[in-house]
Amino acid sequence: MKLFKNILESVKPHFVEGGKLEKMYPAYDAFETFLFVPDHTTHAGSHIRDAIDLKRTMITVVLALMPALFFGMWNVGQLHFTAIGEEFTLMSAFTFGALKMLPLIIVSYAVGLGIEFAFAISRGHSVNEGYLVTGMLIPMVMPIDVPLWMLAVSVVFAVIIGKEVFGGTGMNILNPALTARAFLFFAYPSFMSGDKVWINTGDAATVDGFSGATPLADLAANIPLDMSLIGSFFNGTIAGSVGETSFVAIMIGAVILLVTGIASWRTMLSVFVGGYIMGLLFNLWGANEFMNIPSYVHLLLGGFAFGAVFMATDPVTAAQTNTAKYIVGFLIGVLAILIRVFNPAYPEGMMLAILFMNVFAPLVDHYVVSANIKRRLKRVKA
Amino acid sequence: MSKDSLFSKKNLKLIKDPLDDNNPITVQVLGICSALAITVQLKPAVVMAVSVFFVMCIANVVVSLMRNMIPSRIRIIVQLVIIATLVILVDQVLKAFLYDVSKELSVFVGLIITNCIIMGRLEAFALANTPWKAFMDGVGNSLGYALPLVVVAFFRELLGSGTLFGYPVLENLGLYQLGYENNGMMILPPMALVTCGVYIWIQRMRNNKLVEQN
């Protein structure tokens, strides 16, 4: 740490006002505050500055993502070796998955942070930390075999059109990670859906009876759910995007987020409640296999848990008032299951449901706030 | 035509203004529906631009010639009749000589009649100016309509289908062997909106006059 400090101190004069690289100050500032607690003081009025700034908040979310990420890496290897019928150990599966996953993470961060730095320098504000989490989320919601250049294109789209256009971190309407996924989903559908993309088989022949379809895709094709697999829905040894499969690993992340108070428990809870109630309603209807599965299974499958814990709780795009958090969260859950069951083209509705409710969150907030004002005005009059 | 020469600065401004500072699509945000609908490929976009050019120039001149005879209470009807006549002409020509494109453009040729840019120019300019000025204004505004249209269509066709005017550019460059894929989203209407938005963004970055002060 002393070494970093010395390096930073020695180059600082170049970046402050009057230095040769004055224009590049946002880049310097980003590195300095990333490594050390900044020594800035407030200029006017008295404020309490919390040492837990945005960067540390973001790091906590990244930490919460780690269980799902590590499990996802192992799962990639595990599915690969199972599909081609080879023996594997815990380590060999994990190494295989990690080697597949690392390029995705590196590309995501390199491209995304590159754009963030470029915008920060050209606009003269400090580099926003929002991308620390987004950059980790994006590879985790992709199929493992997504080509790197496509990932890069989607990151460019998400960061520029999804975020910078609106003014950068904190101003975006849509969740950038989901924007990236939605972009890929509509731009290159053959790489983002179907039964070929979720499991990396290399060029090797697969074992007999192998199917690369996710449980949700099977259900959409009206194939009954094998309830004996319920355990693997829980621990996540099923096909799917890298980070989304394991309910257990995601719940560990959820506990970290809730204990540190970073994510809103209101949103999380109401998403699950919404999904569960919608599942029950479909049970009553029961017109096809998809409607008939037990309601709680809906919450285990696909990206539901991942979306509820890490995407719907995004503090920027979620609703701001507590009442609105309940409403928006509930509707996300309802819509996700609704899209799943009704639209066979989208076996997973979580992405679209969250993006949709992102757009409506400010509206719900507005009505909650104005209802509150009205209520209090009435009290004044009375 | 008083003291002004035909190509005086004032008259040339009529052509230059709508290209950038006062572009009908990106600044006045008129005629957006057709701009979004027909920019999937270059060819229909160019044909549309030419049709609008034809209709707008002639309608402007005709209305300008008749401007002292048109009773102001029924002027909209008169303008509509003039535009509709011209549009029907264009439509018939397209059907006769460019049937494929005509089918692709389908209802949008007919909808030139209701294109707000044309009506707007007739109302705002041709009714109050001499035929030559009205002609220049028609040229300027239809070029101003054509410019974003062609630029957006260029990117949408290149990235969405990998072709330009139907010519397989990207295939001949050998990009597909490298694993390149066409971007299916570019063909969908939402990307027309996004591409238009990026065009406006870049235009405003270069032209400070367009940036609102607040």
Image (cartoon, coloured by chain):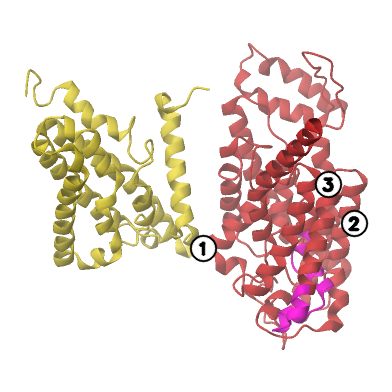
Chain colours: A red, B yellow
For the residues carrying marks 2 and 1, which lies nearer the camera in this image? 2
Q: Amino acid at mark 1?
A: Gly
Q: Residue at x 58, y 59 (%)?
A: A184
Mark 3 neighbour class, 10 Å CA radius: few under 14, some 14 to 19, many 20 or more: many
Q: Residue at x 80, y 68 (%)?
A: A277
Indicate which disc residue A252 carries.
2
Q: Position of residue B123 (x, y in %)?
A: 23, 37
User: Which residue position holds label 3?
Assistant: A263
In this view, the residue farthest toward the right is A259
Q: Position of residue A87 (x, y in %)?
A: 83, 78
Q: Quadrant of the C terminus of chain A?
A: top right
Q: Amino acid at mark 3?
A: Ala
Where disc 1 sits, the SS reads loop
Chain letter of the residue beneath label 3 in the structure image: A
Q: Amino acid at mark 2?
A: Ile
Mark 2 neighbour class, 10 Å CA radius: few under 14, some 14 to 19, many 20 or more: some
The span from disc 2 to disc 1 (Cα, nearest Å) is: 38 Å
Q: Is residue A183 magenta?
A: no
Chain letter of the residue beneath label 1 in the structure image: B
Q: Is residue A151 visible?
A: yes
The span from disc 3 to disc 1 (Cα, nearest Å) is: 40 Å
User: Which residue position holds label 1?
Assistant: B179
Magenta region, residue range: A281-306
Quadrant hosting residue A125: top right
The answer to whether mark 3 and mark 1 are in CB contact below 8 A is no
Q: Is residue B43 visible?
A: no
Considering depth in this image, is A365 or A15 the residue closer to the camera? A365
